Structure formats: C-alpha cells, structure tokens
Amino acid sequence: MPYFTYEVVTHPESGARLLTHIETYPKYREAKLRVKEERDKHPDRDPQEFRLVFAKNTVEAEKLLSIPRDERVIGDI
C-alpha cells in the first residue's frame, strides 16, 4: 500500500477539514521527507497541517484524515 501526503487545513469556525493531496509515495521514507520539507517551507503554520497516511487509495486516506483525533495524553495527573 502506498503513502499519501496531504495538506490539512481546518476551518476555524465550522471545524471542517479541507484536504489537499500533495503526492503519493511507495515508501515511508520518501513520504516522511516530503512532509518534513513542507513543514520546513512553512514554519509559521501548524506542523499538523502537513500529514502522511498509509492507505489503499485516496478515498481511504481522506476518510482516515477526516476522522477527528483525540488529544494526546502524556503522563497521569
């Protein structure tokens, strides 16, 4: 399965996500480097706006990226 790289922009009021496919890569390392390059080109933006996802096709990739993720919990308070 290939790796898909996307730009993910969340609308501030509605929370809707606009997904823009950047490129598809056969290997993880290539996709990871592309996302890193995009993040480095846009240091003023949130790093989470550039994502990679492992999926069968673009439909599955966009479905996975559209699902809101829970906040990451580190440690126990």
Image: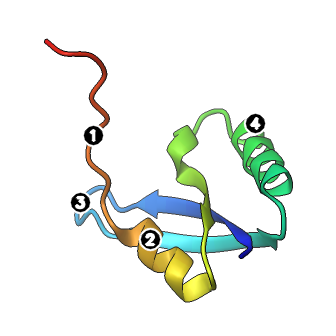
- Of badges 1 and 3, nearer the viewer stands 1
Q: Residue under circle 2? A: 64
Badge 2 crowding class, 10 Å Cα cut-off, few under 14, some 14 to 19, many 20 or more, is: some
Residue 40: numbered disc: 4
The C terminus appears in which quarter of the rendering?
top left
Q: Which of marks 3 and 2 is nearer the N terminus?
A: 3
In the image, what residue type sits under mark 4? Asp
Q: Which of marks 1 and 2 is nearer the N terminus?
A: 2
In the image, what residue type sits under mark 2? Leu
Q: Residue under circle 3? A: 13
Please name the residue shown 23% across and 60% down the image: 13
Please name the residue shown 69% across and 41% down the image: 39
Q: Residue under circle 1? A: 71
Residue 65 image position (x, y, % from top left): 46, 67
In whole angstroms, how far apart are the C-alphas of marks 2 and 4?
24 Å
Badge 3 crowding class, 10 Å Cα cut-off, few under 14, some 14 to 19, many 20 or more, is: few
In whole angstroms, how far apart are the C-alphas of marks 3 and 2?
22 Å
In whole angstroms, how far apart are the C-alphas of marks 1 and 2?
16 Å
